[in-house]
Image: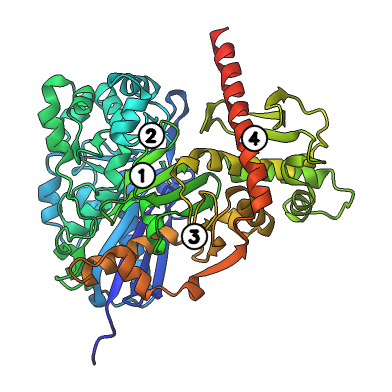
Amino acid sequence: MAKLGPLYLGFDLSTQQLKGLAISSDLKVAYEAKVDFDQDFSMKYGVEKGVLSNKEEHEVYAPVAMWLEALDLVLRRLQERGIDFGRVKGISGAGMQHGSVYWSTEAESLLAKLDQSQSLVEQLAPKAFSHANSPNWQDASTQKECEEFDQYLGNQEKLAQVTGSKAHHRFTGGQILRFRRHHPNDYWLTSRISLVSSFLGSLFLGKIAPFDISDVCGMNLWDIKLGDWHDELLALTAGPEDVGHLKKKLGNVPGDGGGSMGTISTYYVDRYGFEPSCIIAPFTGDNPSTILALPLRPLDAMVSLGTSTTFLMSTPHYKPDPSYHFFNHPTTTGLYMFMLCYKNGGLAREQVRDSINEHSPSASVSSTTWTSFDETAAQTPPMGQETETSPMKMGLYFPKPEIVPNVRAGEWHFMYDPASKSLSESNQGWHMPKDNARAIVESQLLSLRLRSQNLMESSGSSMPPQPRRIYLVGGGSQNATIAKITGEVLGSAEGVFKLDVGENACALGAAHKAVWAVERKPGESFEELIGNRWSEKEHIEKIADGYQEEPFETYGKAVEGFNAMEKEVLKQEKAKAAD
Ligand code: XUL
């Protein structure tokens, strides 16, 4: 019997799950399966929300052995759903960014002779690793190392200019430096270092995979403009004598995100029935992979409204700044990925929703419904301005310490008069808790507008610079009021859309990358290939208008006040720290 058409696999190794998804050449999802680390492995590995932690040191990490078990399990689950792995022509994947895996000197030989009669975990753990755990992106143990990274080239601006980001606790360079200091033996016994993405790629390849051109930018070690490792930052990480050794541990980084890294290891051919010709394309970070879930054009922005808020955009302009991140684009040379990554988001909105529900006159309101929050936000005028000349109400809502800007947990309320540009910290005139509903959504969106406005261009006719389209993903994207306010604050020439791929954007992006890697014609870009096969009607829905002149201008004035408010809060924080 003739085989059905080709399939492409995309994997997503995230904090709490390993997901696998198979699509056909015309990009239709055919199979999916997942392993949930808490549900499947919490007894064995003791993980909570997928990780272990050492609170005193602010360490957060995950056992690598658990991920090995998860890979065999997710493949078995895909088989149980009926997939014929013999149809799979290409595989790619994504890993949470910044996490690192430390391979032992035996790793290459163990990976090369994987035997189908035993599982990955039996054959690789613990021998293939110099360290059993992988520091996670939530780890915050590297304050000292961050200070060293930020100072090493002069200041944060310089580091951001070179590597695309200032130092962050989670970035891999600082993590490796701390690893060398705290586990010197393990460091010396490390033959290679992988990111989570290249670790997963290595398992499929049966040899250590190189870093991906986009994910490598999450390390504070890669000189983006030069397209190579930054020798001074390697010297800081390894010690000046040992730059060569560290370079060997890190390896070379190929420039093509869609090239083949090689064919699949015989382990998967013998154990699961893959064809030996199945190719493994580079695995990238979860955020770069997410922008591949659709043919995102420059000036299209994706706003993920989940537990945290993330803003992703592809742009041809490299304009780094310490308050955000630039990465190489995962597929397209000459483009960059711009990213804003907040710690706060959904939880802050939920707290406001809960307090509005508690104060609701209707006793029947369930504490987790959004109806009152939505109605209140929709009825409140932009910036809480009762008349055109009354002051604007603005606030900051951070139940968790924030990184954009870098301030402690807290809530602040201000009044801002755009005519005189005067700002005062006060909640007089605020109707509490009602005014918080619109103010919190505006606050989160004004922060995005403030930090992305320099990258925007006019999309046509007389419109001021703004995004072309905004795609909302994550839990908050289901909320029509939030979508409406998004269009009012951020604008967008074509409107606000909902991307309907559930929780799968990242794995889907990886599967798209696998299709592109195998089926592209010479010179055909990712955007061209996916754009031609992707059906807008099936995947996206316009949920709110974008640019409207009046609110866009009002929020343009509000952004200035918002900027002043953040500066004021940071000044207060500094003064407190000095006391
Ligand atoms: C991005 C970041 C997180 C992780 C996990 O810098 O740390 O988004 O990639 O999702």
Q: Is residue 264 above or below residue 5?
A: above
Residue farthest to the bottom, as pictured:
1
Relative to the observer, which residue lies in front, 355 or 378?
378
Asked where in the image residue 219 lies, by quadrant, the reply is: top left
Q: Earlier in the sequence, mark 4 or mark 3?
A: 4
Asked where in the image residue 141 lies, by quadrant, the reply is: top left
Instruction: Tell me if 525 is positioned left or right of 426 in this view.
Output: left
From the Cβ of disc 1, is ligand 1 less than 8 Å away?
Answer: yes
Q: What residue is pinned by disc 4? A: 397
Dot 4 falls on a residue whose secondary structure is strand
Tell which tag, 2 or 4, sits nearer the viewer. 4
Relative to the observer, which residue lies in front, 17 or 507?
507
Q: Is residue 55 above or below residue 526?
A: above
From the Cβ of disc 2, is ligand 1 less than 8 Å away?
Answer: yes
Q: Ligand 1, what quadrant?
A: top left
Residue farthest to the front, as pictured:
462
Q: Is residue 85 above or below residue 131?
A: below
Tell which tag, 1 or 4, sits nearer the viewer. 4
Q: What residue is pinned by disc 3? A: 503
What is the distance, in whole Å, between disc 3 and disc 1 at their CAs? 17 Å
Q: The disc labelled 4 sits on which kind of residue? A: Tyr
